[in-house]
Image (cartoon, grey):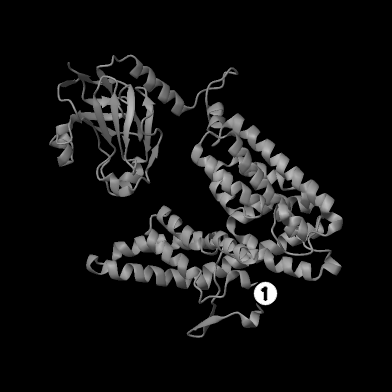
Amino acid sequence: MFEGLARFINTCASAPFAFLPVLIGISATKKFGGNPYLGAAMGMVMVSPDLLNAYSLASTAPADVPFWNWFGLEVQAVGYQGTVLPVLVVSWILANLEKRLHKVTPSWLDNLTTPLLSILITSCLTFILVGPIMRTAGDWLADGLSWIYNTLGIFGGFIFGLLYAPITITGMHHSFTAIETALIAASETTGGSFIFPTASMNNVAQGAAVLAVLAVTKNEKLKSLCTASGISALLGITEPAMFGVTLKLKYPFYAAIIGSAWIAGTHTLALAMGAAGLPGFISIDPKNWVNFFIGLGISIAVSFVLTVFLIKKYGEDGKAAKKLKNSKNENGSALSAKENENNEVKQRAETLDENRLAVCMNGEVKPIDQAKDGVFASKAMGDGVVFVPEEGMVYSPVNGKVVMVFPTKHAIGLQADNGAEILIHIGMDTISLEGKPFELLVEANQKVQAGQPLIKADLKAIQDAGLEIETPMVITNQENFTLDKTGKVKAGEGIITVND
């Protein structure tokens, strides 16, 4: 009665990981500057049902592995289900190949040939070079770890315990299946598999770290993610926990690695494959159950406590640690150059009254009608000034709040406490960059102070894209003001006086 339901639930849970290259192909190709739809297509090629499933490779005899004959060259037709590293390399190749083809292909032919050639050439490279190299690297890694574990005794066990989580990130842990199958099949001489218990410790440690984040975070979205991914990690599925929480926040990931190391040193072995987590004791030799449960307890406790400690000390993203390192403290250590600059901007802005707007970027300033962009120069968006910035930090020109943040992070709208509505647009036509050169430092509806950093822009990346870095700052709801200064300016200085 429950068997069918169990299979259905397992299908729902495993489907995203079976097609993981598709999901990674989309995000990675977009990150590398390529077309995400081509990345998705390339991911589909790598998990096509016409290929031998990657999970079946370990149990398939070499003579039975399918291949294509390309003019005498035999190329294995093997998929990449559940892998990460191969598709990352493939996405980088695809994105760079696509960008180069766009440059050399005539516009009337570009839409037809560039996607076709990008997929075809990348696919050839994937199955001839990238895939086999990554798979061979995984085999070498697995063999090397087996040697470490079997040769270096307890020290080798600890090394393997520490390395298992980083290996999981790359997807190379799938190459352990062949070794594990052989170890279990020869358990009369080997005693069983050392890989499964180590995987179980890693999984529960990841789960405990995620539950620790759940216990201390105030971010409701993160809480929701932690609830589901933490439980699944305890039961043996760690990808949601690792890629959604622990790897992103870093400190929980480190804690989970430390917590998973102990069990490998006790030579606890498995006699069967199974769910590598809390239910994993079913696969363990009963005489090793005590060590297994002790290992579970240690992994969970160390990961949970260490994660809570690190988050409380350094914050969820480690920014507090950086701040502590770079700021002046009671021991008299010096401020970082950037913090000195930010403090100077803030101090200059604090001297202004509420009817004056501050310079928002270091550089040169000129009236808005001298802007290179015709829309801004015509004052259609409002009157104001345009900056030719020397560096990419954008500071708030007023005390007020953020009323609008563009999804592409190239522009921001503010409302000053005196009622002025201000638009800062970084560069010209930079909406086309889809947010890549911009780091948003505030959010919508947030209160801000004059001189507070708002956005950090990579000016070189904007110029490399062939775009203008001129940055207009316009008052969209008022025209009665005085421009106090032109030419060279520093952020935080008074630049505009709003007249009553």
- In this view, 149 is above or below 373: below
Task: Count the marks.
Answer: 1
Q: Is residue 333 above or below residue 193?
A: above
Q: Horizontal and vertical percent for residue 173? A: 64, 60
In front of the other: 204 or 223: 223
Give the image location of residue 202, x and y in percent: 69, 50
Q: In the rendering, at what x and y percent does residue 63 appear? A: 64, 83
Residue 109 lies in quadrant: bottom left
Residue 413 visible to the viewer: yes
Dot 1 surroundings within 10 Å: few (below 14), some, or many (20 or more)? few
Of residue 44 and residue 216, the one placed in the foreground of this image is: 216
Q: Is residue 299 left or right of residue 318?
A: right
Looking at this view, name the residue that lies furthest to the left: 378
Instruction: Kindly give the residue lying farthest to the front in the view shown.
Output: 1
Which residue: 52% across, 24% down? Answer: 327
Q: Secondary structure at mark 1?
A: loop
Quarter of the image that includes the C terminus: top left
Quadrant where the N terminus is found in the figure: bottom right
Residue marked by disc 1: 59
